[in-house]
Image (tube, rainbow, N blue to C red):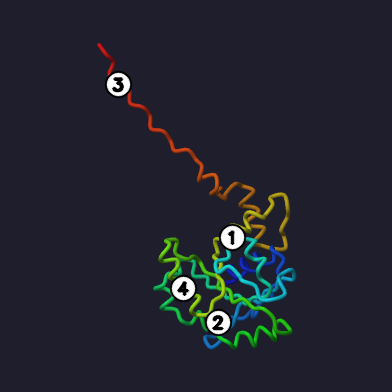
């Protein structure tokens, strides 16, 4: 869990957010509804603003001012409708008491977005929309996938910089230096290999 939370922290800090971790101890079950992070965008809008439900780019983050973030690092799971139906505890943080705690944490009232960090949503249209509908109905305002955050971090890390103050960023830098990250955008345009032509029998 610590690595997953580090990914989330580095991602938001990369984009200029102030990040406060709610706790550093392992919470007992009665505290499952607590948030993992409070994040504040000093350059965000000052009033209520429509936030894209699936946060997929830096442009989407510009709509955020203040948010509570809960991290669900179930990296082998896709958050389908069936998975969500059997995990009601993940939605407890979206209750009205969150606003009271967030108001105290941020030092006053203001716009608040409840963000759930997930491993992945379904890719198929209908299944994806069903999961989104369930999450919205439970009070979630936005979701962001680990793949989105990791891809963004990899893209922004520069090989010629030393990130010795962050183990995560330094590891990404080293892997990037040795070309151990594939370039998915290049894979999309890779030409298929042509099958060798069969030589016909020589005419006699």
Image quadrant of residue 28? bottom right
Q: Quadrant of the C terminus?
A: top left
Judge depth for marks 3 and 4 and give the one in front.
4
Instruction: Tell me which numbered mark, 3 or 2, is placed earlier along the sequence.
Output: 2
Where's residue 137, x and y in %? 48, 78
Residue 150, disc:
1
Badge 2 density bin: few <14, some 14–19, many ≥20, Cα 10 Å: many
Q: Secondary structure at mark 1?
A: helix
Q: Quadrant of the N terminus?
A: bottom right
The residue identified by callout 2 is 94
Judge depth for marks 4 and 2 and give the one in front.
4
The residue identified by callout 4 is 133
Image quadrant of residue 41? bottom right
Seen from the viewer's position, the closer of residues 58 and 194 is: 58
> Is 88 left or right of 104, judged from the image as shown?
left
Query: Residue at left 56%, top 75%?
Result: 141
Instruction: Tell me which numbered mark, 3 or 1, is placed earlier along the sequence.
Output: 1
Give the vertical position of 124 relative to 112 (above or below). above
Q: CA distance from mark 3 to mark 1?
A: 51 Å
Judge depth for marks 2 and 1 and give the one in front.
2
Judge depth for marks 3 and 2 and give the one in front.
2
């Amino acid at each position: 869990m610590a690595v997953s939370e580090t990914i989330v922290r580095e991602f938001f800090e990369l984009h200029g957010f102030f990040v406060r971790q709610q706790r550093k101890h392992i919470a007992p079950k009665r505290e499952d509804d607590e948030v993992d992070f409070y994040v504040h965008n000093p350059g965000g809008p000052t009033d209520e603003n429509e936030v894209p439900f699936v946060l997929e780019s830096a442009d989407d983050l510009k709509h955020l001012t203040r948010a509570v973030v809960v991290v669900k690092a179930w990296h082998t799971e896709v958050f389908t409708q069936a998975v969500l139906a059997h995990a009601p505890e993940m939605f407890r943080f979206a209750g009205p008491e969150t606003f009271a705690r967030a108001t105290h944490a941020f030092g006053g009232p203001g716009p608040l977005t409840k963000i759930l960090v997930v491993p992945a949503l379904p890719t198929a249209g209908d299944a994806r929309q069903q999961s989104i509908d369930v999450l919205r109905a439970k009070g979630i305002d936005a979701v962001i996938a680990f793949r989105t955050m990791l891809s963004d971090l990899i893209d922004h890390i520069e090989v010629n910089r030393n990130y010795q103050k962050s183990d995560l960023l330094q590891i990404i830098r080293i892997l990037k230096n040795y070309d151990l990250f594939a370039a998915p955008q290049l894979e999309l345009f890779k030409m298929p290999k042509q099958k060798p032509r069969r030589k016909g029998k020589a005419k006699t």
